[in-house]
Image (cartoon, helix red, strand yellow):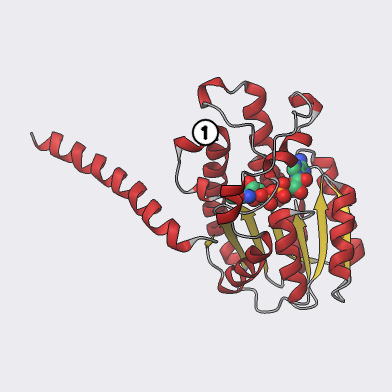
């Protein structure tokens, strides 16, 4: 359990904008020093300046979570500048353009999984040794989604959903493995948040996955009206870290019936199979 946040160091990957920026702001409000890491270096530096204006030490660095060398260099640079890391937020994520899962090409699958799943796995590999070395306890928050708890075909983001389910499972296992070392693990499962995810995803698709995609339009106004602001997510994450919650939910009231429906469907099928066996 992380009792002390103040004067310790946090790393927020995918922290330049959107939810990550919201998390970085909230951690700075707790008195943490923050390293903002993102593939968009200029935006990361701008956010670091915003944090520094709150009176905490902050740096912005470029990192590409699909590149182990980039992550290793960032881990060394953060420790040199801000000291040992106590909180790691793995928040970088991308979504391929909407469409049926049967029409997604290998490159779409590989790109989305390389960021949303393997990007987290690699970032943990890069930062965990430092967290173990200082031995003072630490916390890792990996951003999944409500789409990592329930699959909604109507959203037409099947590859993204599969990657977020994988992220959730990874977090559950990692949490059990690291608990004896006093390193907590949470999975952040946001509902709809007012960010530019589809636009940042499109412009940051690497060349080896087909290069940047045409920039989609902004979030439709009717969705934006009901979306939560990214700055509201940060304090929810801080509460989740302090309570060492496995699931950090931005929309708890919406999550409960959806998760119950998913588990009711599993239970129905199990009962169906049991009834068949009794026949
Ligand atoms: N916006 C939502 O409604 C919503 C809902 C559920 C989950 N999420 C998840 O929240 C996280 C943050 O998304 P957001 O909505 O704030 O969008 P965002 O685009 O503002 O944030 C994503 C960040 O990741 C960075 N990034 C992309 N590829 C990267 C890479 N290879 N290496 C390093 N950084 C990279 C982007 O530059 C961007 O700053 C994502 O994991 C997303 O899947 C978002």
> In this image, 115 relative to 242: left or right?
right
Picture layout, residue 104 above or below residue 60: above
Q: Position of residue 139 (x, y in %)?
A: 66, 65
* Viewport quadrant of the N terminus: bottom right
> In this image, 173 relative to 39: left or right?
left
Picture layout, residue 195 above or below residue 68: below
> Are there few (<14), some (14-19), or many (20+) residues within 10 Å of tag 1?
some
Q: Is mark 1 within 8 Å of ligand 1?
A: no
* Viewport quadrant of the C terminus: top left
| Residue at left offset 69%, top offset 64% | 231
Pick the residue in front: 27 or 212: 212
Number of marks present in the image shown: 1
| Residue at left offset 63%, top offset 22% | 106
Tell me which corner region of the image, top left, top right, bottom left or bottom right, holds residue 24. Answer: bottom right
Picture layout, residue 131 above or below residue 155: below
| Residue at left offset 75%, top offset 23% | 210
- Does dot 1 land on a helix, a strand or a loop? loop
Q: Position of residue 169 (x, y in %)?
A: 51, 47
Q: Position of residue 132 (x, y in %)?
A: 72, 63
| Residue at left offset 79%, top offset 31% | 206
Pick the residue in front: 71 or 129: 71
The residue beneath circle 1 is 156
Q: Tell me if residue 65 can be seen.
A: no
Residue closest to the far front: 221
Q: Tell me if residue 113 can be seen.
A: yes
> In this image, 139 relative to 268: left or right?
right
């Amino acid at each position: 359990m992380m009792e002390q946040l103040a004067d310790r160091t946090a790393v927020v990957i995918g922290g330049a904008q959107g939810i990550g920026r919201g998390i970085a702001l909230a951690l700075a409000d707790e008195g943490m020093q923050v390293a903002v890491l993102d593939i968009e270096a200029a935006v990361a530096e701008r956010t670091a300046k915003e944090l520094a204006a709150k009176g905490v030490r902050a740096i912005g660095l470029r990192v590409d979570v699909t590149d182990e060398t980039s992550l290793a260099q960032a881990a060394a640079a953060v420790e040199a500048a801000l000291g040992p890391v106590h909180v790691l937020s793995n928040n970088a994520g991308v979504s391929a353009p909407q469409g049926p899962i049967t029409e997604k090409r290998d490159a779409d699958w590989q790109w989305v999984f390389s960021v949303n799943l393997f990007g987290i796995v690699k970032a943990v590999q890069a930062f965990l040794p430092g967290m173990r070395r200082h031995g003072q306890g630490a916390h890792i928050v990996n951003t999944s989604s409500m789409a990592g708890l329930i699959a909604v075909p109507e959203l037409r983001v099947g590859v993204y959903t599969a990657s977020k389910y994988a992220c959730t499972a990874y977090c559950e296992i990692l949490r059990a493995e690291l608990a004896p070392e006093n390193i907590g693990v949470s999975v952040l499962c946001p509902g709809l948040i007012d960010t530019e995810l589809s636009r940042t995803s499109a412009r940051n698709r690497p060349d080896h996955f087909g290069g940047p995609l045409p920039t989609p339009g902004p979030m439709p106004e009717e969705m934006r009206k009901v979306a939560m602001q990214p700055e509201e997510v940060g304090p929810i994450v801080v509460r989740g870290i302090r309570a060492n919650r496995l699931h950090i939910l931005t929309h708890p009231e919406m999550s409960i019936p959806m998760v119950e429906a998913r588990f009711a469907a599993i239970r129905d099928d199990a009962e169906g199979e049991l009834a068949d066996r009794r026949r």
